[in-house]
C-alpha cells in the first residue's frame, strides 16, 4: 500500500487532470496539423469500423467519443452512426471539434462535443450527461493519460445501454521499444521527462487489484509521471508511459464486473522516427472491447 495519504493522492491526480486541460487547451487549434496525430486518429477510426462495423447502424447507433480531442476518430465513425457526442476535459478541444462540425455543415443532432470530465465523484451527485446512454463508447489514444484505467473503464461502462459496447485503443507495451515512444523529444507534442530513468511497474501492470481494492500503483502520486514541455514550462500530464500489456487491459475490462465478451487484440502497426536515435521503430496499437450485460 502507498504511504501517501489519500488526500495527497487525490490532489495529485487532480493536478494531472488540470494540467492536461491546460496543455490541450493550448494546442487545440494546431492539433490536427501534426501528421502523426492525424495518422493515428485515422487508423484508430478505421480499426473500429473494420473490427466492429457490424455493431453500427447509421439510423440508430448513438456513440460517445470519450477524450474526443478535435474529432479525428469521430469523423471516421460519423457515416456509420446516427449521433456522436464527443466528450473531452479540454474546452479548447471541444470548441475545435464543434467548429469543424459547423464548417462541414454537420447538425448538432448528428455530432457535437461537450467539455466534461466524467468522474465517479460527480456521478454520485448526479448524472453528468443528463441521463444519456450510448450503444457504443469509444476512447482512443487516451488511456495513458488516466491515473486509473480501472476507474475510467468502470465509469465509461456506466454510460452504456444494456448490451452496449465499450471500445478502447492505445499503445501496446513492448519492453524493447516502448521507452522510446514517449521519449523526451518524440511524442508528437508530448515531450516527456522520466523522473528517475526507471520503468514504472504500473505501466506494465496498471490494473492489478487486491481484495477488490485498486492497486495504489495505478493512481499513486509515486507514479513516474511524465511531462509535456512547452516553451520551457514543464507540465505533468502523463500517468502511464510506454503503453499497456494486453493481459492487463483484459483484466481492466474484466474487473468492471459489468462487461463480458471481452476481446483484446492488435489493431494496427505503424512506424515512428525517433529523433534521438535517428532511426524508425515499429509500434503496435491494441483495440479492446467489452459488452455490457
Image (tube, grey):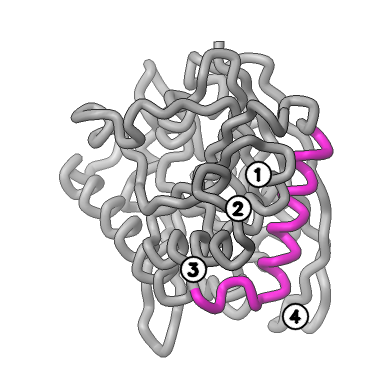
- The residue identified by callout 4 is 277
The CA distance from mark 1 to mark 2 is: 6 Å
Q: Residue at x 72, y 60 (%)?
A: 40
- The residue identified by callout 2 is 141
CB-based contact (under 8 Å), mark 3 and mark 4? no
Q: Read off the magenta span.
A: 29-51
The CA distance from mark 2 to mark 3 is: 20 Å
Q: Residue at x 65, y 44 (%)?
A: 169
Disc 3 element: loop
The CA distance from mark 3 to mark 4 is: 17 Å
Q: Is residue 164 visible?
A: yes
The mark that comes first in sequence, 3 or 4, is 3
The mark that comes first in sequence, 4 or 1, is 1
By secondary structure, the bulk of the magenta-drawn segment is best described as helix
Disc 4 element: loop
Residue 6 screen position, x and y as percent: 19, 40
Q: Is residue 163 above or below residue 32?
A: above
Tell me the tag on residue 169: 1
CB-based contact (under 8 Å), mark 1 and mark 2? yes
> In the picture, which quadrant includes the C terminus?
top right
Amino acid at each position: 500500500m502507498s504511504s501517501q495519504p489519500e488526500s495527497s493522492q487525490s490532489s495529485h491526480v487532480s493536478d494531472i487532470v488540470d494540467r492536461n486541460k491546460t496543455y490541450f487547451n493550448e494546442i487545440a487549434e494546431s492539433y490536427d496539423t501534426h501528421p502523426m496525430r492525424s495518422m493515428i486518429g485515422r487508423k484508430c477510426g478505421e480499426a473500429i469500423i473494420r473490427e466492429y462495423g457490424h455493431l453500427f447502424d447509421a439510423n440508430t447507433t448513438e456513440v460517445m467519443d470519450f477524450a474526443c480531442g478535435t474529432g479525428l476518430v469521430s469523423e471516421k465513425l460519423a457515416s456509420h452512426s446516427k449521433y456522436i457526442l464527443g466528450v473531452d476535459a479540454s474546452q479548447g478541444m471541444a470548441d475545435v471539434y464543434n467548429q469543424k462540425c459547423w464548417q462541414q455543415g454537420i447538425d448538432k443532432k448528428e455530432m457535437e462535443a461537450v467539455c466534461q470530465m466524467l468522474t465517479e465523484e460527480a456521478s454520485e451527485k448526479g448524472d453528468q450527461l443528463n441521463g444519456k446512454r450510448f450503444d457504443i463508447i469509444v476512447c482512443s489514444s487516451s488511456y495513458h493519460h488516466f491515473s486509473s484505467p480501472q476507474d475510467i473503464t468502470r465509469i465509461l461502462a456506466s454510460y452504456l445501454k444494456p448490451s452496449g459496447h465499450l471500445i478502447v485503443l492505445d499503445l501496446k507495451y513492448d519492453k524493447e521499444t516502448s521507452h522510446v515512444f514517449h521519449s523526451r523529444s518524440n511524442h508528437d507534442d508530448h515531450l516527456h521527462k522520466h523522473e528517475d530513468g526507471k520503468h514504472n511497474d504500473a505501466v506494465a501492470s496498471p490494473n492489478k487489484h487486491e481484495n477488490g481494492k485498486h492497486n495504489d500503483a495505478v493512481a499513486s502520486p509515486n507514479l513516474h509521471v511524465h511531462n509535456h514541455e512547452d516553451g520551457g514550462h514543464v507540465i505533468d500530464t502523463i500517468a502511464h508511459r510506454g503503453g499497456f500489456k494486453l493481459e492487463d487491459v483484459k483484466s481492466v475490462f474484466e474487473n468492471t464486473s459489468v462487461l463480458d465478451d471481452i476481446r483484446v487484440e492488435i489493431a494496427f502497426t505503424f512506424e515512428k522516427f525517433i529523433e534521438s536515435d535517428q532511426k524508425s521503430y515499429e509500434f503496435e496499437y491494441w483495440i479492446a472491447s467489452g459488452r455490457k450485460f
